[in-house]
């Protein structure tokens, strides 16, 4: 194993993040076999049950069987335990996809801006304009225009993140291109695209991975906010934000409906952030400063 | 100074133009016929045709952009479909709660974060420092609406110290205004405190390693004087910069916090507008917030002149 990898794995913060996220990934994959029921099914007899209530539960197949409702039911009679567990899937998919999508586009734009000075000023002015619009607001507006599906929500959350990635990659390119090895490559006549792919890109990986984890954390939060405000995925789809949007209505009588998805959401974002801090400390890219993040 | 200000204001123009073009393009991103989508399911063909003419969607893209820019420059953001009112007037009506919430949040944040960050940097590696760093990771991770409901549960429902929801206008008295606003502002300030305390800590810690701090201590100045007059004063520029950048974060948080506490401000207006697919209002609010962001950061740049006499533009 290479030395950097060992150093990263020895970091306590990285370990904490990896353990929690692995557990959440397992929950997401194994959701169907963890004693859950169809998260969109509602059993009208068992509306607003308290956590740990023993009830006779009627499933979609019309069979009634005794069941312990670990987290209770919402006001429609949907099983919150099942909805929270299935909600893990949406949050993780959105977090990872937004990070991947914004990194790919942002890296491409950053490489172009950093290496081709002619497009730089125009491209960076456009990025400045995008950054002047608060991220959540732009995401909300894009979802409003496109309509809320999983794919549009992912793109809408990713678009406001692109300028930040572009800026980071551009700054990296600007510093890397002054290195002697780039001068050497240029002097032996290496084509520009080859320099970008062979030399600039590999040297930008570490800060980009760190940035990617921060983007992932903020994407998970923003997806939950969209759902919570009733602007995200349709309400029957089990997302943590949707469960909490449902919980608002009955908050004074059933506050626990808010806490269960809230704990999962907070823990997930915490794990991703801690992982990002750990990676930053071990990989030590001087470019990822917390204050410049959002 | 005058010429700096002029150049700095001039530099904001391209940013604002790009924001305006992005916002203009927004409604054209609606798949299919935007007029039909905006009109909703119950609309008749006449309704759709009327909306199309009203938005000028039946004309060419460039003509539309021209008309839109002309209206924008004369301060006309169009009419709301849903509220049947002028968008500029609508934003004006909702301004006070939002500005109150944001201003109180910034005041709380600066009063809490700057002393905390300074003390943490002073006792670098001590218990306060470690607690603050732990808290700041938590602050970044706890969703603002979960925190909001947690505080509502404890301080409004259980302890009954604050009202659960709502807003009182400033003209009804400062007391009721503050009483309704403290819990939302405190909720919103947590993530902001995390951000600013972190930056304060880092920049004060850096200033404390400088030679002038050693000199100040050597000539027998008290620690508080060294910290405030020498370290903090030299750390002011990064702190103010982050407060400016953090405005984007704050605005995002305002939308959510207003929703949690039912505060009738611009955030609530945005959510209502999106639910009603009221595009002129959505566009207007985004333009307004972007303008606010640009102006605050302009002020931040100007403040450098006062915070650091070495900076001369």
Image: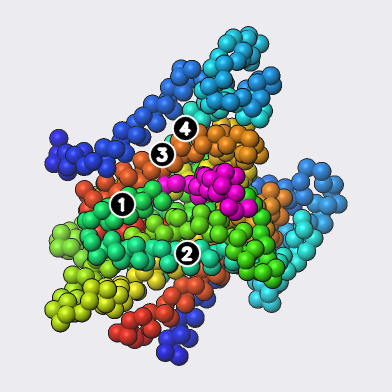
Distance between mark 1 and mark 4 Cα atoms: 29 Å
Q: Magenta stretch? A: B140-163
Badge 4 sits on which subunit?
A
Q: CA distance from mark 3 to mark 1?
A: 18 Å
Q: Is residue A118 magenta?
A: no
B248 up-or-down from A220: above or below: below
Which residue position is annotated with label 2? B108
In the rendered image, which quarter contains the C terminus of chain A? bottom left
Give the alpha-carbon distance from disc 3 to disc 4, as whole Å.
Answer: 11 Å
Q: Magenta residues: mostly which secondary structure?
A: helix
Q: Upstream in the sequence, badge 1 or badge 2?
A: 2
Q: In this rendering, do the residues under marks 3 and 2 share a single chain?
A: no
Give a yes or no on whether discs 1 and 4 share a subunit. Answer: no
Res B229 quadrant in image:
bottom left
Q: Residue B226 appears at what percent x and percent y?
A: 24, 76
Q: What residue sits right under mark 1 in the picture?
A: B131
Instruction: Check the residue under mark 3 and report the chain it is in.
Output: A
Q: Is residue A242 above or below residue B136?
A: above
Spatial separation of the CA atoms under disc 3 and disc 2: 26 Å
Dot 3 surroundings within 10 Å: few (below 14), some, or many (20 or more)? some
Which residue lies under the disc numbered 3?
A267
Instruction: Tell me residue A219's x, y (percent).
Output: 46, 46
In this rendering, the answer to whether A175 lies above or below B303 is above
Q: Which mark is residue A88?
A: 4
Residue under the image location 45 percent in, 36 percent down: A264
Q: Are marks 3 and 1 on the same chain?
A: no
Disc 4: CA contacts within 10 A as few (<14), some (14-19) or many (>=20): many
SS of the residue under disc 4:
helix
Marked residue chain, label 1: B
């Amino acid at each position: 194993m290479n030395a950097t990898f060992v150093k990263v794995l020895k970091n306590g913060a990285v370990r904490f993040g990896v353990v929690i996220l692995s557990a959440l990934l397992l929950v997401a994959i194994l959701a169907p076999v963890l004693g859950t029921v169809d998260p969109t099914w509602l059993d009208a007899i068992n509306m607003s049950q308290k956590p740990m209530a023993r009830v006779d539960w009627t499933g979609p197949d019309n069979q009634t069987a005794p069941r312990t409702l670990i987290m209770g039911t919402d006001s429609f009679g949907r099983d919150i335990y099942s909805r929270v567990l299935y909600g893990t899937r949406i949050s993780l998919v959105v977090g990872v996809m937004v990070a991947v999508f914004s990194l790919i586009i942002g890296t491409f734009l950053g490489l172009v801006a950093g290496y081709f000075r002619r497009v730089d000023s125009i491209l960076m002015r456009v990025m400045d304009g995008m950054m002047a619009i608060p991220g959540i607001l732009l995401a909300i507006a894009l979802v409003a225009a496109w309509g809320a599906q999983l794919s549009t929500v992912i793109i809408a959350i990713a678009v406001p993140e692109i300028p930040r990635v572009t800026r980071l990659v551009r700054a990296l390119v600007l510093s890397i291109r002054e290195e002697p090895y780039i001068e050497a490559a240029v002097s032996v006549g290496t084509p520009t695209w080859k320099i970008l792919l062979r030399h600039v890109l590999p040297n930008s990986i570490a800060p980009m991975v760190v940035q990617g984890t921060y983007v992932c954390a903020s994407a998970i939060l923003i997806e939950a906010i969209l759902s919570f405000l009733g602007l995200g995925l349709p309400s029957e789809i089990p997302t943590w934000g949707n469960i909490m949007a449902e919980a608002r209505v009955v908050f004074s009588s059933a506050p626990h409906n808010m806490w269960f998805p809230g704990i999962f959401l907070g823990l997930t974002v915490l794990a991703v952030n801690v992982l990002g801090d750990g990676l930053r400390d071990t990989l030590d890219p001087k470019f990822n400063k917390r204050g410049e993040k959002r | 100074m005058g010429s700096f200000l002029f150049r700095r204001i001039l530099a904001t123009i391209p940013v604002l133009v790009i924001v305006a073009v992005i916002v203009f393009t927004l409604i054209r991103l609606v798949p299919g016929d935007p007029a039909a989508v905006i009109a909703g399911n119950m609309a008749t063909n006449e309704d759709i045709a009327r909306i199309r003419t009203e938005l000028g969607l039946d004309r060419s893209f460039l003509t539309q952009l021209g008309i839109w820019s002309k209206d924008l420059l004369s301060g006309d953001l169009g009419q709301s479909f849903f509220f049947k009112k002028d968008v500029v007037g609508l934003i004006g009506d909702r301004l006070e709660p939002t500005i109150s919430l944001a201003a109180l949040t910034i005041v709380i944040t600066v009063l809490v974060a700057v002393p905390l960050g300074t003390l943490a940097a002073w006792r670098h590696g001590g218990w306060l420092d470690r607690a603050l760093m732990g808290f700041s990771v938590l602050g970044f991770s706890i969703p603002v609406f979960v925190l909001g409901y947690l505080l509502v549960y404890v301080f409004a429902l259980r302890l009954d110290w604050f009202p659960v929801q709502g807003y009182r206008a400033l003209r009804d008295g400062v007391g009721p205004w503050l009483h309704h606003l403290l819990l939302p502002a405190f909720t919103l300030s947590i993530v902001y405190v995390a951000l600013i305390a972190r930056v304060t800590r880092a920049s004060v810690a850096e200033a404390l390693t400088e030679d002038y701090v050693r000199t100040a201590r050597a000539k027998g100045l008290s620690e508080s004087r060294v910290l405030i007059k020498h370290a903090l004063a030299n750390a002011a520029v990064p702190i103010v910069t982050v407060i400016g950048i953090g405005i984007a974060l704050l605005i995002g948080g305002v939308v959510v916090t207003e929703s949690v506490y039912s505060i009738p401000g611009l955030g609530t207006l945005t959510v209502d507008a999106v639910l009603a697919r009221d595009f002129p209002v959505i566009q207007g609010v985004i333009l307004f917030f972007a303008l606010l962001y640009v102006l605050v950061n302009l002020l931040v740049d100007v403040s450098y002149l006062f915070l650091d006499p070495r900076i001369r533009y």
